[in-house]
Structures are given as C-alpha cells and as structure tokens.
Amino acid sequence: MSSPELTLVKKEELDWQDEGICRQTDPEVFYPEVGQESWDAKKICKGCPVRDKCLMYAFETEDEWAVMGGLTYRERKKFRRQRVRPTKENIDAWIDRSIKDARERRQRAYDKLA
Ligand code: SF4
C-alpha cells in the first residue's frame, strides 16, 4: 500500500525554510544558468530534512528558476503533467531518477572533454 499524498504548502507558510540545508550553502547553486547542470543542488536537496515540504511549496509557487525540493522547474512541470501522485515514495523515486539522469549527463559532458 502506498503512502498518502503530500499536501501543497501555502505561500504564507514559510517557517520550514529555516531548516533547509540551502540556508547554509551557496544560493547560486540552486539557480543554474540555462544549460548548466543542476546536479550539485539536487544532491543537497536529497539530504534536506524539509525536502518534501519544499517540493510541495514549489508546486504551489511555480518558481521557474530555482531547483527546489530536488527538482528543476521543468522536472516539476513534468511530474505534474504526468499526474504522478505526490506520495513520499513517488517523489523519492522521481528525485532519484532525476539525480541519476543529471549524473549521467555530467559524465557524458566530461567524456566529451577527455
Ligand atoms: S529541498 Fe533543497 S531547495 Fe528546498 S529547502 Fe531543502 S535544500 Fe533548500
């Protein structure tokens, strides 16, 4: 049996952000330039204690630039478009796949340089 769906986090509910690991890291990492890899931000988000809240907040606010909750805006849009149920298991699987894809893209880019 799958876990219940996580609920959206309202825009005015911001207390959870104080616990985000990104508060202790370079914010630039979460705003990759167009064409720049988001791997570093995703790795940080994966270990963040408020990742699920952050992702549900991102769905609510639709920030187009930031990596939030471990996903880029495009990935979040895809997640919603494919109507994936926002359960903890589904989100974990989605983020793991997104990190794996980012790692493979980075490796391919390194291989081209070699
Ligand atoms: S999930 Fe990522 S962007 Fe969200 S609060 Fe945590 S570290 Fe910051």
Image (spheres, rainbow, N blue to C red):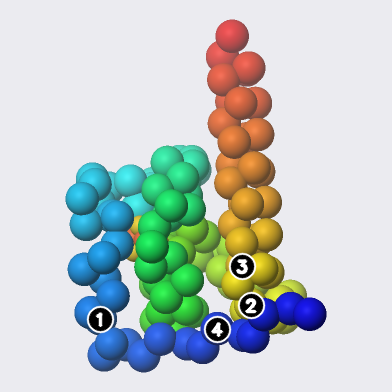
Q: Are marks 4 and 1 in contact (CB under 8 Å)?
A: no
Residue type at mark 4: give it.
Answer: Leu
Please tell me whether residue 71 is drawn above or below residue 28 in the rendered image: below
The residue tagged with tag 4: helix, strand or loop? loop
Residue that carries the numbered disc 3 in the rendered image: 91
Q: Are marks 4 and 3 in contact (CB under 8 Å)?
A: yes
Please tell me whether residue 1 is drawn above or below residue 95 in the rendered image: below
Residue that carries the numbered disc 1 in the rendered image: 14
Quadrant containing the N terminus in the rendered view:
bottom right
CA separation, marks 4 and 1? 17 Å
- Depth check, front residue: 64 or 86: 86
Residue that carries the numbered disc 2 in the rendered image: 87
Residue that carries the numbered disc 4 in the rendered image: 6
Residue that appears at 46% across and 45% down: 43
Residue that appears at 43% across and 52% down: 47
Quadrant containing the C terminus in the rendered view:
top right
Question: x, y percentage for residue 18?
Answer: 21, 68
CA separation, marks 3 and 2? 6 Å
Question: x, y percentage for residue 70?
Answer: 48, 58
The residue tagged with tag 3: helix, strand or loop? helix
Residue that appears at 56% across and 69% down: 76
Residue that appears at 62% across and 17% down: 112
